[in-house]
Each structure stands twice: as structure tokens, then as C-alpha cells.
Image (cartoon, grey):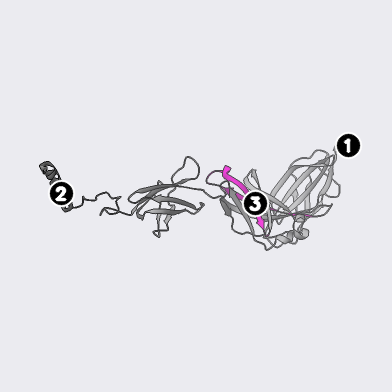
């Protein structure tokens, strides 16, 4: 016996299956669907280039390179940048600007998406006015002493506190420089006796550089500079000297040195008490044509000595031996 209901159900299912085979696929409009005509296997990259430390200000004019596209763009006044139509996947960006350490940023870009990145550039130390001057200090005992003084101005756009180390490099020699406040500078004194051969002439002709490092390990190097002169000639004081008895306002006299380059004189006057000298007066910038100079004040009775320097236009100097004299109390004579 047949069952009309079963036949009807089976017929309906068959009809539905036939109809389903005749219906077209549903439209694929999801842009993330690889089979969608709207699918894009690319996206955009945006970001900002900022200062290394707070308040993280935007850096304008920084170059941002996307090696995968072979293009470089420049940040705007707010430090922002934007790339379009970048292939999805892992990305590397190179961020650079003169005066800053180069930064590498890595990110992943999803198809049809936007990757947002941030780079903080470390400003490098700035080295200026790096120079070396030589000094010859003649003395009765143990003889002349030679030295060289290296100075440099070193600043950092991220702040003076970001500077961690300043050194001077000559050949294989490395010496740390100390900071001085008046005037602000980094400085180191190199004793001639500490150099190879115990001679300051070792420095002549060698390129000298100042190296500066900041806390994030950023590194700067000055242009090479050189010893320009070692002054061997010294001035010979002629009066008062050798414990001469002088007036309370002595006239310092000396013999001019045999020097052809431009120079000037500096006189220093010391009072000596119990073997300890104290600088009490000096005068700089005296013309090379002079051979005498009147002390402008009045000295009390005591033991004194004076010295005279030759200083060239670069600051190199040579100092005479000490010329001692005595000022006596006129009432005791």
C-alpha cells in the first residue's frame, strides 16, 4: 500500500535540490575575502617621528624609507607620514635625519588594513670648536715642562644630561675629557712626559679628534684637528730678577725673543710666602714690540717673582723662568 504523504515529501526534497543547483552563488563583497572582487592584498602605513625623550615632539623633515616599495617620504611639520598601496605582510621602515641616530621600525600590515607606527629619534651630540694648544713652562728646576690642552664644546639637543662620555683620540691614545663650567667646555690636559718617547713632539702631524657618546649610545666624532705650533723660544726677564731689590711699583723689563710669527705677551706676578706662591696680578695682550711694562699698583714689602709668556694667535704659549725680587720696607732702611 503506497503512502501519498511520503511520495509528496520526497518529491518536494528532490525539487528543492534541483532548484538549489540552478541558483547562482551569493555575491562576495567582503574585501577581506580573497575571492571577492573588492579584495586588496595591500593597505596603508601611517606614523609619526618623535623626539627620543618626553614630551615627544614631532620631528619635521625626517626621511622615512620603505625598502619594499623603494620610496622615501619626508615627515610634515608635525612629524607625521603616510604610505598608500603597501603590500600586506611584514614591513621594515628606515627613519633618518641629519644629526640623529637612524632608527629601524618593523610592523605587520594586514590586507586592506592600516598599520600605525611610531619612531623616536635620538639626537646625537654636537661637537664644535675642538682644538689643541701646546704649553711650554720653563722653570729653574727641574727644567721646562711641556703639555697640550684639548678643549671642545659638546652639546646635545636632547639636553646636556644626555651626554655620557667625551674623549679625545690621538692614534691609539684615548683620554677622557672633563666638563668645566667657566666657560662651559670639555677639557683634558696631556702631559708631554706621558706620551710615547716622553715628548710632546709625538703629537705633531697626527690627526686629533674629539668623540662624544650619549646615554642611548649615540655617537659623534669631530673633524680632525692638529697641533699648529710648539713654541720653544722663551722671553728672558732682565729686571727685576735674581732677588733684586725693587721699588714698590717695579718696571718689568725683558729681552725680546727671536720670533717671526704674530704673538703677544702676558705678565703674571706672584707673592711668595713660606714657599707658597700666590698669583696677585696679571696683564694680557701686551704688544710684541714692548720690552718693559710699569706695574700699575703699589706692592707691600715681601718676596715676589714674575713670569712673562709668549702667546701666539692660536693660544699656544711659552712661559719664562721665574724672576724673583724683593720689595723692602723703606722705613727699615
The residue mark sitting in front, 2 or 3, is: 2
Do the numbered discs 2 and 3 sit on residues whose CB atoms are within 8 Å?
Answer: no
User: Mark 1 or mark 3, which is nearer to you?
Assistant: 3
Give yes or no for residue 158 being in the magenta stretch. yes
Circle 3 — which element?
A: strand
Q: Which residues are magenta?
A: 144-171
* Residue ID for mark 1: 332
Q: Residue 37 location, x and y as percent?
A: 25, 54
Viewport quadrant of the N terminus: top left
Which of label 1 and label 2 is nearer to you?
2
Residue 106 drawn at (x, y percent) = 45, 51
Question: In the image, is residue 161 part of the stretch drawn in magenta?
Answer: yes
- Looking at the image, tell me whether mark 1 or mark 2 is earlier in sequence order: 2
| Left or right placement of residue 218 versus residue 174 in this view | left
Tell me the crowding category of disc 3: few under 14, some 14 to 19, or many 20 or more residues within 10 angstroms, Cα based. many
Number of the label disc, if any, that sits on residue 14: 2
Return the x and y of residue 275 as percentages of the image width and height: 84, 42
Taking the image as shown, residue 125 lies to the left or right of residue 69, namely: right
User: Are the residues flagged by discs 1 and 3 in contact, CB closer than 8 Å?
Assistant: no
Disc 3 target residue:
167
Amino acid at each position: 500500500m503506497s503512502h501519498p504523504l511520503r511520495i509528496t515529501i520526497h518529491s518536494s526534497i528532490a525539487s528543492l535540490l534541483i532548484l538549489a543547483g540552478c541558483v547562482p552563488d551569493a555575491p562576495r563583497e567582503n574585501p577581506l575575502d580573497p575571492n571577492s572582487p573588492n579584495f586588496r592584498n595591500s593597505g596603508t602605513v601611517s606614523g609619526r617621528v618623535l623626539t627620543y625623550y618626553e614630551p615627544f615632539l614631532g620631528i619635521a623633515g625626517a626621511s622615512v624609507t620603505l625598502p619594499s616599495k623603494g620610496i622615501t617620504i619626508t615627515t610634515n611639520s608635525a612629524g607625521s607620514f603616510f604610505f598608500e598601496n603597501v603590500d600586506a605582510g611584514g614591513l621594515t621602515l628606515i627613519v633618518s635625519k641629519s644629526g640623529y641616530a637612524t632608527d629601524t621600525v618593523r610592523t605587520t600590515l594586514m590586507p586592506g588594513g592600516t598599520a600605525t607606527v611610531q619612531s623616536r629619534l635620538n639626537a646625537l651630540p654636537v661637537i664644535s670648536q675642538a682644538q689643541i694648544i701646546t704649553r711650554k713652562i720653563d722653570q729653574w728646576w727641574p727644567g721646562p715642562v711641556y703639555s697640550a690642552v684639548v678643549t671642545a664644546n659638546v652639546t646635545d639637543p636632547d639636553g646636556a644630561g644626555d651626554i655620557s662620555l667625551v674623549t679625545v683620540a690621538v692614534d691609539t691614545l684615548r683620554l677622557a675629557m672633563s666638563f668645566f663650567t667657566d666657560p662651559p667646555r670639555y677639557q683634558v690636559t696631556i702631559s708631554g712626559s706621558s706620551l710615547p718617547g716622553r715628548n710632546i713632539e709625538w703629537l705633531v702631524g697626527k690627526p686629533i679628534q674629539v668623540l662624544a657618546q650619549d646615554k642611548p649610545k649615540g655617537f659623534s666624532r669631530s673633524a680632525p684637528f692638529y697641533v699648529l705650533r710648539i713654541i720653544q723660544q722663551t722671553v728672558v726677564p732682565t729686571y727685576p730678577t735674581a732677588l733684586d731689590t725693587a721699588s714698590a711699583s717695579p718696571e718689568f723689563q725683558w729681552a725680546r725673543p727671536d720670533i717671526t710669527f704674530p704673538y703677544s705677551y702676558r705678565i703674571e706676578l706672584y707673592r711668595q710666602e713660606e714657599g707658597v706662591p700666590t698669583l696677585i696680578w696679571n696683564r694680557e695682550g701686551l704688544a710684541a714690540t714692548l720690552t718693559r711694562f710699569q706695574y700699575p699698583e703699589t706692592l707691600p714689602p715681601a718676596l715676589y717673582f714674575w713670569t712673562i709668556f709668549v702667546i701666539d694667535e692660536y693660544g699656544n704659549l711659552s712661559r719664562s723662568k721665574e724672576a724673583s725680587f724683593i720689595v723692602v720696607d723703606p722705613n727699615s732702611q
